[in-house]
Amino acid sequence: MITFEHDTGKAQTAVRAARRRGLAVPQDIDACHAMWQVVVNAGQMRAPDRPTVDDIPTTAEQLAALIEERAHQQRIAESHRAIAGDFKEPVARRYNQLVKDRVPGWILALQPEFTGLVKALATQSKKLPEQLDVHLLDWNDPKITAAWEKAESAAHQLDQLVNDRQDMAKAVGGDGGRDNELYAVAKIAEPTSADVFAHKLRDQVGPARREWRELKGQPVSRWLYLARSPHFELQLATPGEVRDRAAAMERWHDAVAVVMTTGMSRSQAQHAVTTALRG
């Protein structure tokens, strides 16, 4: 049985995603995968099927020889399965690590295509009204429908690219955390003390994140909204960068909590906010 430690499924999925995107897959990954396949094949070696009437030879001597041969085949199959089981964990571990080490570079290599699609989306967004809810757009206006169709094409390609990026990210444990879908594709500027005291999170960034969440069922509008928003910089992230972006937002929330604390002077609050933002 293949346990979690022996599972190479996520790594193999990441490699397939990289190939779909035309990214280079190092030879050592393919060589290790070939070794993994050898282990799998050896682990599935079967003993001879139980004999039937048709397998009975004509003499006792022939039967003795046949039994000896089948016993040998059964011992070989059992030995292969046992030894293959010993190799599953170390070979899988090596393969998974080789892929894991490659994932950040693969994701970074997707950035030029991602940027090009974002630019195409932004171009069409200028031709569309401020309100992007599909239920409120004037579909009788040919200018709107033409711009929407082009934006829809870019958004669809972005979704495909991001799905491949997610397949790669899973090979290193995934992104984790709330709003990881957002942080995987968008960066929010690091907050400053001035941002905290100006309530920028409450009045600007927070509402922008809520709007993004509310557009979950409207993927084209969601991408258009991100491309337009001054609060997001569309940029792919490695899993580590996703966690960094989420951590920066947590520090912002911590700093806001400090401001809400009563009994501190202005200078004390400023010092506490600075400390919170540093983490």
Image (spheres, rainbow, N blue to C red):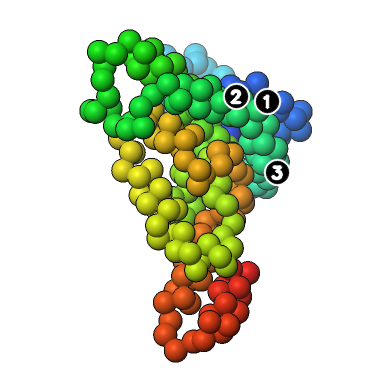
| Residue 193 picture quarter | bottom right
Residue 199 horizontal side relative to residue 111, left or right: left
Label for residue 23? 1
SS of the residue under disc 1: loop
The residue nearer to you, when weighing 1 against 20, is 20
Which of disc 3 and disc 1 is earlier in sequence? 1
Q: Residues within 10 Å of mark 2 (few under 14, many from 20)?
A: few
Residue beneath disc 2 = 116
Label for residue 101? 3
Which of disc 2 and disc 3 is earlier in sequence? 3
Rounded to the nearest angstrom, the CA distance separating label 1 from label 3 is 14 Å
Q: Can residue 171 be seen in this view?
A: no
The relative height of residue 12 versus residue 249 in the rendered view (above or below) is above
Which of disc 1 and disc 2 is earlier in sequence? 1
Rounded to the nearest angstrom, the CA distance separating label 3 from label 2 is 26 Å
Q: Which amino acid is tagged 2? A: Gly
Residue 56 drawn at (x, y percent) = 46, 18
User: How many marks are shown on the rendered structure?
Assistant: 3
Residue drawn where x is 50% and y is 16% of the image = 57
The residue nearer to you, when weighing 66 against 220, is 220
Rounded to the nearest angstrom, the CA distance separating label 2 from label 1 is 17 Å
Residue drawn where x is 61% and y is 44% of the image = 238
The relative height of residue 253 versus residue 132 in the rendered view (above or below) is below
SS of the residue under disc 3: helix
Closer to us: mark 3 or mark 2? 2
Closer to us: mark 1 or mark 3? 1
Q: Which amino acid is tagged 1? A: Leu
Q: Going by the picture, which residue comes out furthest to the right?
A: 27
| Residue 277 picture quarter | bottom right
Closer to us: mark 2 or mark 1? 2
Residue 72 horizontal side relative to residue 231, left or right: right
